[in-house]
Image (tube, rainbow, N blue to C red):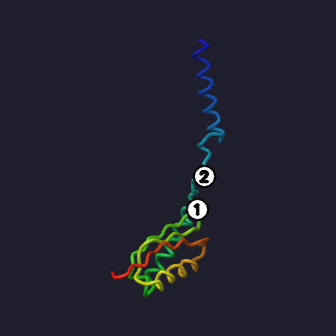
Amino acid sequence: MRFVILPAILLLSGCTAMLLGGGSGGGQAGPGERSSTQIAADASISAAIRDRFAADSVLGHYRLGIETRAGRVTLQGAVDTYAARSRAGALVRQVEGVVSVNNRIRVSSGN
């Protein structure tokens, strides 16, 4: 009987902690996770950057990757000139909410 009661007590104590918010179901993002608010803010930043690139007479011709995480933007892809690469970084820095820019755009020659 003792062997049945002890596991039942341990199991129920874990359920109680979760019901009271002490378990992993507390609803707050952990250190490596983003909240839904942060995900929405990052998506908004990426959309604003895409709009600026599409409207730009130089950058509108390229397919560039944009990843935003906690306001930190990473750009990827390839352009034909260093001026276009610099322009991409400058346009990103103008977007509200951008904390930093990691410009990983390559300049390809002969394309």
Which disc, if any, is residue 86? none
Residue 92's image quarter? bottom right
Q: Who's the residue at 42% across and 73% down the image? A: 77
Asked if 24 appears above or below 81 in the picture, the reply is above
Q: Residue furthest top?
A: 1
Q: Who's the residue at 62% across and 26% down the image? A: 10
Q: Residue furthest front?
A: 109
Location of the C terminus by quadrant is bottom left
Residue type of the residue flagged with mark 1: Gln
* Residue 1 point in image, percent of width and height: 59, 11
Query: Would you name the residue on which mark 2 appears?
Result: 29
* Residue 105 point in image, percent of width and height: 46, 74
Q: Residue furthest bottom?
A: 57
Q: Closer to the N terminus: mark 1 or mark 2?
A: 2
Residue type of the residue flagged with mark 2: Ala
Which disc, if any, is residue 38? 1
Q: Name the secondary structure under disc 1.
A: helix
In this rendering, position of residue 5 left or right of residue 78: right
In this rendering, position of residue 80 left or right of residue 34: left
Asked if 51 appears above or below 16 in the picture, the reply is below
Q: Name the secondary structure under disc 2.
A: loop
- Between the residue at mark 1 and the residue at mark 2, the CA separation in whole angstroms equals 10 Å
Residue 12's image quarter? top right
Residue 19's image quarter? top right
Asked if 29 appears above or below 51 in the picture, the reply is above
In this rendering, position of residue 10 left or right of residue 105: right
* Residue 46 point in image, percent of width and height: 50, 71
Q: Are marks 1 and 2 in contact (CB under 8 Å)?
A: yes
Q: Nearer the viewer, residue 43 or 73?
A: 73
* Residue 110 point in image, percent of width and height: 34, 82
Q: Who's the residue at 40% across and 82% down the image? A: 80
